[in-house]
Image (cartoon, grey):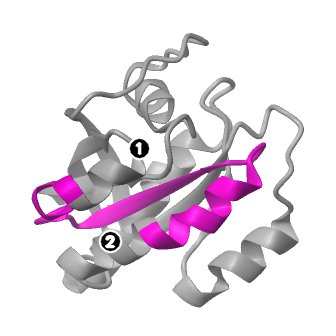
Amino acid sequence: MLERKLKVKLCMVGDSAVGKTSLIKKFVLDVFDDAYITTIGTKITKRTVKLKEGEKEVAMDMMIWDIMGQISFRSLLQDAYFYGTHGILAVVDSTRPDTLESIHDWVKSVRQVVGDVPMIFVANKCDLESKITKEMLTKELGRYDCKFLYVSAKTGENVAEAFKALGDAIIEKYFPEMA
């Protein structure tokens, strides 16, 4: 089987305490920590994912950028943070409906810098009692024409699937000859 190698930049977006850093830790290191530690600045983590596209296997180096979620820093850092991004994992907290409302501002910030890049939306903390229903997600996110998943950084539910779905969407958009 022929293998291709790609290197892509992914950015995590969403408000503070939605679980962006926890999702990265679960995906890359398979660990979860209940302690909340605010992300200061930007942290970049890498994981190589094997994706199968048609007859080809793709080894995708995902460079995952994690940024602080404070709204005041979004406008300050957005150009440098989003520049060169191939895909976005937009994260909301399924126990906090206000994070779903504010995700539109994050998407707008991304699109101002890089245009219409592939996005996957995730409602994190699905291991807790959700206050964001599937109908709410469908209504709020329908305008973006992209997939959404309920995930849990704590249990690992759908975490790898979300990153792989984003990888597939990136291949489909930027490397259609590989699909």
The part of the image, by quadrant, that contains residue 132 is bottom right
Q: Is mark 2 on a helix, strand or loop?
A: helix
Residue ID at (30%, 56%): 74
Question: Which residues, given as a range, are shown in magenta?
Answer: 76-105
Q: Name the residue under label 2.
A: 109
- Find residue 80 and report its horizontal and vertical position in percent: 10, 57
Amino acid carrying label 1: it is: Gly
Q: In which quarter of the image is the C terminus?
A: bottom left
* Number of numbered discs on residues: 2
| Residue pictured at 56% horizontal, 41% vertical | 159
Let me know if residue 97 is in the magenta part: yes
Q: Indicate the quadrant where residue 39 lies.
A: top left
Front in this rendered view, residue 57 or 62 = 62
Nearest the camera: 32 or 158? 32
Q: Where is residue 55 in the image (x, y as percent from the top left)?
A: 32, 69
52 sits left or right of 99 in the view: left
Three-letter residue code for mark 2: Ser
